[in-house]
């Protein structure tokens, strides 16, 4: 799955929108019957961030009988993927990673991928489970808890600068838009028995975000 043509940058995205707009000004009869259906350009979730919508990496609908509607958000928890190290920067590799995690979470009857957002090694931000739904990422503590996960194992590897940059931007944006109170940012290890999100992510970065 090649996402580069329409989503490699915000500039490209805007250019695609302009081109789509220009096409609309051409009378339909000029285009004849060879016109293929207009591509669906999913809206950006947040205007200040370039987030890849869930529809760009999965066509599987969430299993609604297994997930709960969100009742607002008052906190945010940061995770790592754990397991093997991950330095994937090609979109198709990341899409495969996301689908692997989705498949694993479906097998656990989570109903959808458990996290609301995923940040890859290149710093791309991917929508996971829609914020319309409660997440599934901290045992017994998912209520009003946004889940943000960084691909990688930060017990074993360092996060990339781009990944950290995006994490800070994303957390800042979510904090503002959802009016998350001071002291409402956590690492998974703050809420449960886990080394997640890993020492190379927690101590230098999550600890800083917890002060915001
Ligand atoms: Zn975790």
Image (cartoon, grey):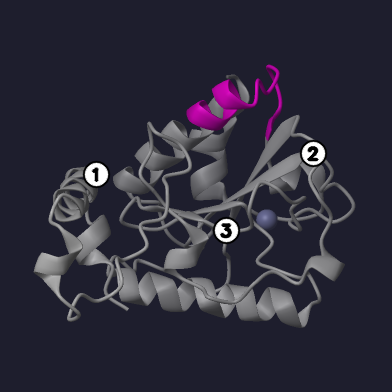
Residue 173: within the magenta?
yes
Q: What is the spatial separation of the Cα atoms under label 1 and label 2, in whole angstroms? A: 30 Å
Residue 86, relative to residue 174: is it above or below?
below
Q: Quadrant of the C terminus?
A: top right
Q: Could you say where residue 172 lies in the image, as x and y percent from the top left? A: 50, 27
Please tell me whether mark 2 sits on a helix, a strand or a loop: loop
- Dot 1 and dot 2 residues touching (CB under 8 Å): no
Q: Could you say where residue 182 lies in the image, as x and y percent from the top left? A: 68, 17
- Kindly identify the residue that appears in the image at 26 percent across and 74 percent down: 2
Please tell me in which quadrant of the rendered image residue 94 appears. bottom left
Q: Earlier in the sequence, mark 2 or mark 3?
A: 3
Q: Earlier in the sequence, mark 1 or mark 2?
A: 1
Instruction: Quickly name the residue at label 1.
Output: 10
- Kindly identify the residue that appears in the image at 77 percent across and 50 percent down: 134
Q: Earlier in the sequence, mark 3 or mark 1?
A: 1
Mark closer to the observer (3, 1): 1
Please tell me in which quadrant of the rendered image residue 66 appears. bottom right
- Report how many numbered discs are placed on residues in the image: 3
Residue 1, relative to residue 56: is it above or below?
below
Crowding at mark 3 (Cα within 10 Å: few <14, some 14-19, many 20+): many
Instruction: Quickly name the residue at label 3.
Output: 128
Q: Is mark 2 within 8 Å of ligand 1?
A: no
Q: Nearer the viewer, residue 176 or 62?
A: 62
Instruction: Quickly name the residue at label 2.
Output: 144
Kindly tell me whether residue 84 is visible in this rendering: no
- Kindly identify the residue that appears in the image at 81 percent across and 76 percent down: 109
In which of the image's four quarters is ligand 1 placed?
A: bottom right
Residue 19: within the magenta?
no
- Dot 3 and dot 1 residues touching (CB under 8 Å): no
């Amino acid at each position: 799955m090649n996402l580069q043509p329409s989503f490699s940058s915000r500039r490209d995205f805007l250019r695609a929108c302009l081109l789509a707009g220009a096409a609309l000004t051409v009378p339909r009869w000029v285009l004849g019957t060879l016109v293929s259906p207009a591509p669906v350009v999913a809206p950006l979730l947040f205007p200040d961030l370039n987030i890849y919508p869930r529809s760009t990496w999965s066509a599987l609908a969430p299993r609604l009988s297994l997930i709960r509607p969100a009742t607002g958000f008052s906190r945010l928890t940061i995770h790592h993927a754990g397991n093997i190290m991950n330095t994937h920067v090609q979109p198709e590799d990341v899409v495969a990673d996301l689908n692997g995690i989705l498949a694993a979470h479906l097998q656990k009857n989570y109903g959808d991928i458990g996290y609301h957002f995923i940040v890859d090694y290149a710093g791309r931000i991917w929508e996971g489970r829609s914020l319309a739904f409660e997440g599934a990422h901290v045992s017994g503590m998912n209520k009003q808890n946004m889940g943000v996960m960084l691909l990688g194992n930060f017990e074993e590897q360092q996060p990339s600068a781009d990944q950290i940059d995006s994490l800070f931007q994303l957390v800042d944006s979510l904090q503002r838009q959802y009016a998350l109170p001071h002291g409402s940012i956590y690492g998974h290890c703050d809420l449960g028995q886990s080394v997640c999100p890993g020492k190379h992510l927690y101590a230098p970065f999550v600890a800083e975000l917890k002060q915001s």
